[in-house]
Amino acid sequence: MKNEKLTPKESLQADNEIKALDLELNFGAKTFISDDAPPELIAAFLDNVKKNEADFQNAPMVAIYEFIGKPKFAPIDLLETDEQFETEIERIQALLLSKRVFIDRPEFLSPRAYYRFLINDFFPHQLRNYTGDTVVHTFTYHEFYQDAPEFIGLNAQAVIEDILNFEKPYNGEWLAEACRSDVDVVPKSTIVKKIKALRTQYQAVIPVAFQPEGFLPTETAMYFTFLVRWEGILADDSGKEQFEGMGICQMQLNEERQWMVEGVQMPGFEF
C-alpha cells in the first residue's frame, strides 16, 4: 500500500482541527472552519482564541460595579418619575456596553423595578476581571430571578408532572415552604407526604396530557389554570382510573422572586 504524505497545506489544516478540538474540550468553545479559508489565517485565529480564553479563565472575579469603574448613580429614593428612572437606566446601560457588559431588560419590569435590580442585584454580581477584545460579558435577568409571567406556567406544570411521574421520587421541587390544604396553611413536608400517599394508590400512571389555559391575578395571589388528563393503574391490580378536566394552581413569589406552588386542585388530587 502506498504511503501518501500530507502536503504542507493539508498538514496545517489537520493541526487546525486539533486546535479546534482542544478549544472545545478545554473551554467549551464551538468553532467552524470554512473549507476555503486560508489555513494560516485560521491557525492564527485559533491561537489567539486559546490565549484569550486562557487569560479569561485565569482572571480574578470582581463585582460588576467595580469592573465598570464604580460610577456615581442616583439613589432610588431620590427618583420619582418613570422619565427620571429611564434617564439613569440609559446612562448605566451605555456605561455597561462601553465595558462590553450586556444585560437584557424584561418588558414586564417597570423602570423603577429594573433600576432597583441594576443597583441592588446586578452591580454586586461577580464577573471575570477581563477586558479582552474578543470577550463580551453577557447576562440575562432570568439568571437572577424567575418572576416573569412565563415562569408561572412552567413551574406549575413542573409540579403537576413531578407528582404524576412515578419513575422518580417526589422531592417537592417548586412547592412553596408554606402550602395550603383546603383552607389551612401547612408546611411543605405535609404536602410531600400527601403526594407520596397518593402514589401508594397506583402502581403506574400512563400518558399525561397538560394544557395551560391562563392566569388570574388577585390582590393576594396568582392563579394558574390548566387542563389535565391522567390515568392511574390501581396498586391492587383491580383496574385503572381516569381523570380529566380543569385544574388550578395557587402561586406565590418567594423572597428570591421565584414562582412557587402553594396549592393545587385538579381531577384526582388536590392540596
Image (cartoon, rainbow, N blue to C red):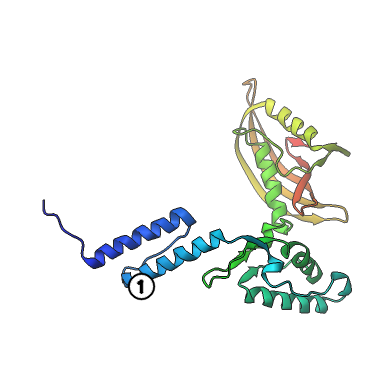
The amino acid at mark 1 is Leu
Give the residue drawn at x 70%, y 49%. Answer: 155
The foreground one among 157 and 117 is 117
User: Can residue 105 be seen by looking at this rendering?
Assistant: no
Based on the displayed image, in which of its 4 quarters is residue 169 positioned?
A: top right
Count numbered badges in the picture.
1
Above or below for 84 versus 3: below
Quadrant of the image occupied by residue 172: top right
Q: At x 64% / y 21%, what residue is drawn? A: 238
Give the position of the C terminus as an image quadrant.
top right
Q: Position of residue 249 (x, y in %)?
A: 77, 46
Task: Specify whether 124 is left or right of 27.
Answer: right
Residue drawn at (36%, 72%), measured in percent from left and top? 41
Residue holding disc 1: 41
* Residue 165 spot, x, y in % from top left: 63, 36
Where does residue 196 sit, x and y in percent of width and height? 71, 30
Residue 229 figure quarter: top right
Q: Nearer the viewer, residue 268 or 169?
A: 169
